Amino acid sequence: MKSSLIETLDGQFSVPLSCMRKIRSFVAKEMDAGLAGRKSSIAMLPAYCDAASGREQGRYLALDLGGTNFRVMLVELPGFGKPPRVVAEAKYRLTPGQITGTGTALFGVIAGYLGKFLKDHAITSEIALGYTFSFPVQLLGIDEGILMKWTKDFSASGVVGRKVVAIQRQALVQKKVRNVNIVALANDTVGTLQAQAVLDPDCGMGVILGTGFNIAVRVASRRIRKETGAYRGKSMIINMETGNFNKVLPRNHYDRRVDMDSGNVAHQFAEKMIAGKYLPQLVRLVVLDLIRKDHFFDGHVPTVFCDKESFKGWHMDVFEAGSKEAVQKLSQELFGRELTPVERRVMARVCRLVSRRSARIAAALIIGALTRLERRSKQRMVVAVDGSLFEKYPGYSRVLAAAIRELAGPAGKGIRLKLTKDGSGIGAAVIAAVVASGNTNLVR
Ligand code: BGC
């Protein structure tokens, strides 16, 4: 492998401190514009709720839709700041056909599975449900919102520009699921923040680093200049839709290709550099380039690199940090042979470049978001994080934390990244409980 090629790649995927600083300041500007209702790549969508108090109690259903898996959970909230408990849970897989077909069919499938869950767990009395719907939604209040656009290659027709909960309710009626009452609609970042806020009053931010990427923050209401209807609380959680941030990002030609191959061209630039859905696609494009320019893999394109989805995030895990045995076992499966030492080294290097860049850009966005956040404590700031990239990718959380310290300096000392497992679903149950208690800060 020519060292000049690797050096070029190093340059194309580097995010120096100066670049993180620029991103941080542009994030703050875009947040201000978004909060004022001006044109911005960060939408700053009101969530119509404040951080939970920990007193929320009861049993609620949560429905979590945000990727090709969707989950139904029955969640018990003990109150008194005690951890929520997932009493029952089921995961269902949506097919590519279902997420790209008609909206009616997609919501029908979800309603069907929800009905099955109720039956399997003998839930027959009326129950409130918090709906985590992890796409850009302009909320109209705590329990309804309009889908602005699909992301993550969803494209079900007839949903963009329409009321999501109304469509879901209709599907529930059609499937004769009569005892479920959807009382809250939330983004997964908002849910994650809420799930952690129940345990820790210093939590003011929720981050998803998984298939997609996004941040929610708690903002003082006086900073929110745009319309927030009947909401009267002193602060409110805002779903930033940070994945769409598009200023001063160090994009290269691989990023432009990923964008062109995506279902939402010219949108979600930050997400396409950070999120788990796109990182393997970037690795694939770099490897294809190396095959073409430098006879990598003997000049042959392995079939796993022929289409954009076959090379997966967990393959990256193994090539970047797996033992020699694990790498060779996977190589046998993917390429029909073991890799040479040079090939192994190059694969590891490419995966590391792509994953490190993701973590450093995410760090810059997180620190940028912190500049407008309403804090309860000056010393401590808890950032709730959920998602497979953060939880499972080898070394990811360490690189992220290090980049945060590098950028924030001494001010970064009190920042704690807390893995908030299942936060997106549990948080929806928490919001449902807030609604049930009547403490919503909404004037009726
Ligand atoms: C969506 C966000 C969501 C994020 C993480 C993005 O594609 O636009 O609403 O929070 O993915 O799931």
Image: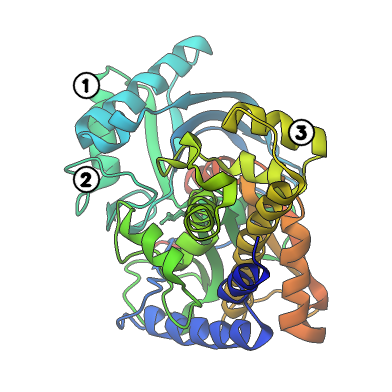
Instruction: Specify the quadrant that holds the C terminus.
Output: bottom left
Q: What distance separates the C-alpha of mark 3 from that of mark 2?
A: 43 Å
Q: Position of residue 145 (x, y in %)?
A: 30, 53
Location of mark 3 (residue): 326
Picture quarter containing residue 38?
bottom left
Residue 124 visible at all? no
Q: Could you tell me which residue is drawn at 72 percent across and 62 percent down?
A: 201
User: Eyeballing the image, is 407 above or below 74?
Assistant: below
**What colour scheme does the image use?**
rainbow
Q: What distance separates the C-alpha of mark 1 from that of mark 3?
A: 49 Å
Res. 159 mark: 2
Q: Amino acid at mark 3?
A: Ala
User: Eyeballing the image, is 60 above or below 34?
Assistant: above
Q: What distance separates the C-alpha of mark 2 from that of mark 1?
A: 17 Å
- Give yes or no for contact between labels 2 and 1 (Cβ–Cβ under 8 Å): no
Q: Secondary structure at mark 3?
A: helix
Location of mark 1 (residue): 174
Mark in front: 3 vs 2: 3
Mark in front: 1 vs 3: 3
